[in-house]
Amino acid sequence: MVVGTLLLIALVVCFAALIAVAFGSMPIASSGSDAAFEMEVGADGEIELDHVAGDPVAVDELSMTISVDGEALEHQPEIPFSGTTGFDGPPSGPINARSSASEWSAGESVSLEVAGTNDPEVTAGDRVTVTLTVDGETIAREETTAS
């Protein structure tokens, strides 16, 4: 009887270990991008974003939200664009509507300049945050001080 109980306990422990190994080795599904970005912001409102690593980002599915000291700009860029209210001139890189690129890949940069007529205006020392989303899911949030 004691031997049977010990065998039953050993069998249950082995089965539990087998299940733990099986579930532990399953890949975890990720719905997001693993793209990485770096950002610089000038006191004149010029924002440069560098895609430094990871998955390419589909430009037609990308949206960008810009905040200055925690306050969202009155006029946000609609990606892609070639000139829009609240921004000086067209952006550079794959977010320019006239670009033939459908993706923003690692090694590529974009820049855009927030116009002085956009509210709030970007000035030296302001904390600027850029949030990138694809299909409503945040893929990056970069924050830096305008200099």
Image (tube, grey):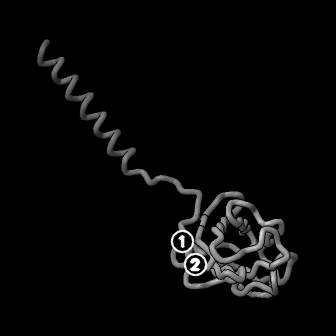
Q: Report the amino acid beneath label 2.
A: His
Residue 46 versus residue 61 in the image, above or below: below
Seen at 81% across and 78% down, the residue is 116
Residue at the extreme top: 1
Seen at 74% across and 87% down, the residue is 100
Residue 19 versus residue 75 in the image, above or below: above
Residue at the extreme right: 85
Q: Which mark is residue 51?
A: 2
Residue 80, image x and y in percent?
Answer: 78, 77
Depth order, front residue of 55/43: 43
Give residue 21's quadrant in the image: top left
Q: Mark 2 and mark 1 in contact (Cβ < 8 Å)?
A: yes
Q: Which mark is residue 36?
A: 1
Residue 116 versus residue 35 in the image, above or below: below
Q: Report the amino acid beneath label 1.
A: Ala
Depth order, front residue of 137/86: 86
| Label 1 crowd (10 A; few <14 / some 14-19 / many >=20) | some
State how far apart marks 1 and 2 are (Cα).
6 Å
Residue 11, image x and y in percent?
Answer: 23, 29
Q: Which mark is residue 65?
A: none
| Label 2 crowd (10 A; few <14 / some 14-19 / many >=20) | many
The quadrant in which the N terminus is found is top left
